[in-house]
Image (cartoon, helix red, strand yellow):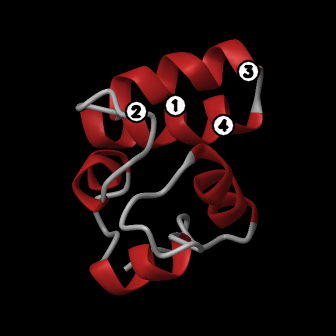
């Protein structure tokens, strides 16, 4: 149930207000570096695979920033991850 709630919060926050997105980012960004690792995103999207993460990481730096995550959500990539 917690995973579902976290996923729902991720979708809502990243498509809602900047303040809500900032709160979610702080919750998911465990190391506080401002980007999301595969492992961090898997907390909200447990079905996310390394292959799908690589498509989300548009600049191939090994981390997904907020813009990359938002783009993936808008494209349905995270909703269908795995």
**Residue 61: x percent and y percent?**
43, 68
Find the distance from the CA under tag 4 to the CA under tag 3. Answer: 8 Å
Question: In front: mark 1 or mark 2?
Answer: 1
Q: Report which residue position mark 1 lands on.
A: 9
Q: Is residue 9 above or below residue 54?
A: above
Secondary structure beneath label 1 = helix
Which label's residue is closer to the chain start, 2 or 4? 2
Q: Which residue in the protein does label 4 denote?
A: 14
Label 4 crowd (10 A; few <14 / some 14-19 / many >=20): many
Q: CA distance from mark 2 to mark 4?
A: 14 Å
Q: Which residue is mark 2?
A: 5
Q: Residue at x 60, y 42 (%)?
A: 11
Q: Is residue 17 left or right of residue 39?
A: right
The tag earlier along the polypeptide, 3 or 1, is 1
Compared to residue 52, the image places residue 43 above or below, namely above
The answer to whether the residue labelled 2 contacts the one labelled 4, judged by CB atoms less than 8 Å apart, is no
Q: Position of residue 58 (x, y in %)?
A: 59, 74
Circle 3 or circle 1, nearest the eye: 3
| Res 6 quadrant in image | top left
Q: Residue furthest bottom?
A: 51
Residue assigned mark 3: 18
């Amino acid at each position: 149930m917690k995973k579902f709630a976290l996923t729902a919060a991720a979708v809502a926050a990243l498509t809602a207000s900047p303040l809500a997105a900032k709160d979610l980012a702080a919750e998911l960004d465990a190391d506080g570096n401002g980007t999301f690792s595969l492992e961090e995103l898997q907390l909200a999207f447990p079905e996310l695979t390394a292959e799908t993460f690589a498509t989300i990481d548009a600049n191939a730096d090994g981390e997904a920033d907020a813009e990359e995550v938002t783009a993936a959500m808008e494209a349905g990539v995270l909703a269908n991850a795995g």
